Image (cartoon, rainbow, N blue to C red):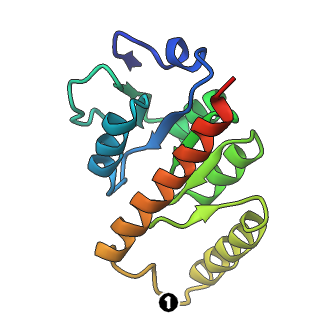
Amino acid sequence: MRSDPQPWHVRAVENRPYILVDADACPVKDEIYRVAYRLGIPVTVVSNAPLRVPQHPLITRMVVGDGFDAADDWIVERADAMAIVVTADILLADRCLKLGAAVIAPNGKPFTTSSIDNAVAVRAIMADLRAGGDRVGGPPPFGKEDRSRFLSALDAALMRALRQARP
């Protein structure tokens, strides 16, 4: 396991929002960095393998083992009400929501406590269909609209978190 010099927990103590990124297949890392720089929000990029991340005091890279759900488990251990979690993983989103974190998919659609049960159920149905040999389509290709929707959702979630963090 590798952590950069200023670990996530030093920043989290400040009662300020922070971003945890399920990064292995995340298509919006550059957008996250830009928003983080603008607002001064720390970001931890969590992956199973080393990824290139900018050398910046707000960005921490955490490489976890390649064990099953290692990145998910690392994120869940650190998610709380001040965390904004970026993931497309529905089960990780469910776990983080239960801890009070805000969760946003890379396509900009927020996972919420009122929508997550339906998302988990649809995921299970699709897995059953695939296991039974049915050919089911995947998500539509990632496009400019998704990137734009993500930026808006991330900005909105961070603004809410910053308002809550004020004493």
Q: Is residue 48 visible?
A: no
Q: Which amino acid type corresponds to the residue marked 1 in the rendered image?
A: Arg
Judge left or right: residue 57 versus residue 62: left
Task: Give the residue displayed 71% in from the left and 48% down from the top.
Answer: 97
Q: Which residue is mark 1?
A: 135
Q: Is residue 156 above or below residue 63?
A: below
Rendered location of residue 17, percent (x, y): 56, 32
User: How many circles with numbers are drawn on the protein?
Assistant: 1
Residue 128 occupies quadrant:
bottom right
The quarter in which the C terminus is drawn is top right
Task: Give the residue displayed 58% in from the left and 16% down from the top.
Answer: 14
Pointer 1: residues within 10 angstroms few (<14), some, or many (20+)? few
Task: Give the residue displayed 26% in from the left and 36% down from the top.
Answer: 51
Rendered location of residue 3, percent (x, y): 38, 17
Task: Give the residue displayed 68% in from the left and 77% down from the top.
Answer: 122
Rendered location of residue 151, percent (x, y): 39, 58
Judge left or right: residue 59 versus residue 127: left
Rendered location of residue 150, percent (x, y): 43, 62
Nearer to us in this view, 23 or 143: 143
The quarter in which the N terminus is drawn is top left
Q: Secondary structure at mark 1?
A: loop
Nearer to us in this view, 73 or 82: 82
Judge left or right: residue 44 versus residue 116: left
